Amino acid sequence: MSADLSRDEPPEDGAAVLAAEYVLRLLDPAAEAACAAREARDPLFAAEVDRWRQDFAGLDAAFMPVPPPPALRARVEAALFGAPPSALARLWGSVGLWRAVAAAATVAAIGFAVVRPPVAPEPRPSLVAAVQPVAGEVSLVALHAPGSESIEFRRLGGAAASGRSLELWILPMGETVPASLGLVPAGERFTATIPPAFAARVGEGTAILVSDEPAGGSPTGLPTGPVVAQGAITAL
């Protein structure tokens, strides 16, 4: 089965095309949030979204799952949380490796299967997000343990412009208004606390955004500047 791209003429307001772009996650965060709100209040638009979801669902059968390297999770955890010294320690800490991790996370986010290693004796992070540049060079990798009230971050590149600040935001699926995780600090590694109201809803599909804000952060509690980096959480 394949998506029917020759459906009847769309409504004058372009709802059919907009619904397709929304289902395929082609919209920027602001437009996606607007579509989510419209889906909730507009039955006709919600029906159009549902039709596109059913059409594109048939594409799943056209692709075979390809697992990433089984050692990927161990490399992510060793790089973020430390590991016994070894001859490969400098490789684990390299920016090149982390860019490879970000690429692998992006592949996983669009539907490829992942291999889960045996259960560790202690809770370990099992969700990852590659927060990639939209404009500029800001790039992060995020790790989150389900049920945890925080997210671990590692900066891969980019920094705030002079006199400006970078602010982190989180947007669980189904939400239309993001919540702030605070400012991106100057260090390479840092931890952000999830607002209590959002902690239980952070999971696969949750968006992480970075916006450019005035020094000290957004004065309104919502993004006021452009989104310079974004990514979605997926299972690792």
Image: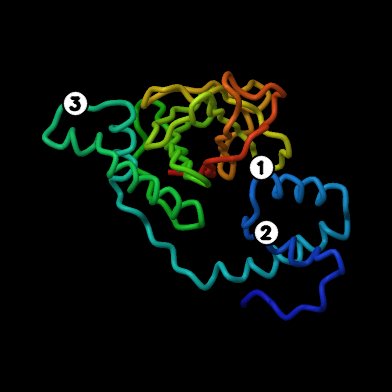
The image quadrant that residue 6 belongs to is bottom right
* Label 1 secondary element: loop
Residue sitting at 56 percent across and 22 percent down?
182
Q: Position of residue 181 (x, y in %)?
A: 57, 25
Q: Which residue is mark 1?
A: 173
Please name the amino acid that badge 3 sits on: Pro
Q: Which residue is mark 3?
A: 84
Please name the amino acid that badge 1 sits on: Met
Compute the Cα span from label 2 to label 3: 44 Å
Q: Quadrant of the N terminus?
A: bottom right
Give residue 23's mark.
2
From this view, report whether residue 203 is shown above or below residue 52. above
- State which tag comes first along the sequence, 2 or 3: 2
Q: Residues within 10 Å of mark 2 (few under 14, many from 20)?
A: some
- State which tag comes first along the sequence, 1 or 3: 3
Residue sitting at 28 percent across and 32 percent down?
78
Give residue 60's mark.
none
Residue sitting at 80 percent across and 45 percent down?
37
Compute the Cα span from label 1 to label 2: 13 Å
Among all residues in the image, which is located at the extreme bottom?
6
